[in-house]
Image: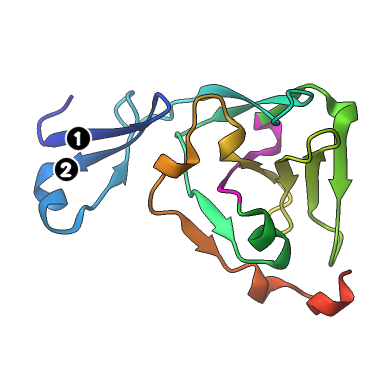
Amino acid sequence: MRKGLATIISVAGISLFTCDSQRCRGDASLRIVSATRGRSMAKTRRGACHCGAVEFEVELLNGFKDLRRCNCSLCRRKGAIMASVPLDKLKILRGENKLSLYQWNTRTAKHYFCSVCGIYTHHQRRSNPNEFGFNVACLDGVNPYELRDIQIADGASNTLIGEELTR
């Protein structure tokens, strides 16, 4: 560990942040770093739906970056904590035929759920179609109740068609 870096915050074995002890005293400032001293650190994590029919893996280039919930009418109801990866960094390992697709509003985003147990696993984002958002709680070893400082994405304001027209 370099001089001046006091704390590594780790969730499910992934080092997310280090905290400079001087800055953390007053405002708990955090900055993302990797164990490779600033270079990108990729870590592959496996995940699954509740029943195990759908299994996937994600390649996290910098740990969990930009964890968020969304307040659009769909995400508000599912309540998942999400992170995103480029499309080529999420791979379905098993159960692609068990995934159900749900689309609404502009039909740009593609929301995937297990057709057996109903768990949301991932979606291709409308705001960035080159990324998959994924349900962090589906990853092995992650307890979503231990995650802090989750951003709220303002999906409700980005809905292009009134909610009454999307049903």
The residue drawn where x is 65% and y is 39% is 86
**Element marked by disc 2:** strand
Query: Can you say whether 117 is above or below 164 in the image?
Result: above
Q: Nearer the viewer, residue 42 or 50?
A: 50
The crowd level at tag 1 (other Cα within 10 Å; few <14, some 14-19, many 20+) is: some
Q: Quadrant of the N terminus?
A: top left
- Residue 143: give x, y in percent of width and height: 47, 35
The amino acid pointed to by label 1 is Thr
> Which image quadrant is residue 85 in?
top right
Q: Disc 1 or 2, which lies upstream in sequence?
A: 1
Residue type at mark 2: give it.
Asp
Side (left or right) of 58 relative to 56 = left
Residue 152: give x, y in percent of width and height.
Answer: 51, 62
Q: Does 86 lie within the magenta span?
A: yes
In this orientation, does residue 152 appear?
yes
Tell me if label 1 and label 2 are in contact, CB under 8 Å. Answer: no
Q: Is residue 60 left or right of residue 90?
A: left
Q: Is residue 81 left or right of residue 33?
A: right
x, y percent for residue 41: 43, 26
Secondary structure beneath label 1: strand
In the figure, is residue 22 to the left or right of 121? left
Q: Residues within 10 Å of mark 2 (few under 14, many from 20)?
A: some
Residue 20 - label: 2
> Percent position (x, y) of residue 46?
61, 22
- Residue visible at 10% across and 30% down? 3
Residues drawn in magenta: 80-89
The disc label shown at residue 7, or none: 1
Q: Quadrant of the C terminus?
A: bottom right
- The reply to whether the magenta stretch includes residue 82 is yes
Identified at 27% across, 48% down, the residue is 30
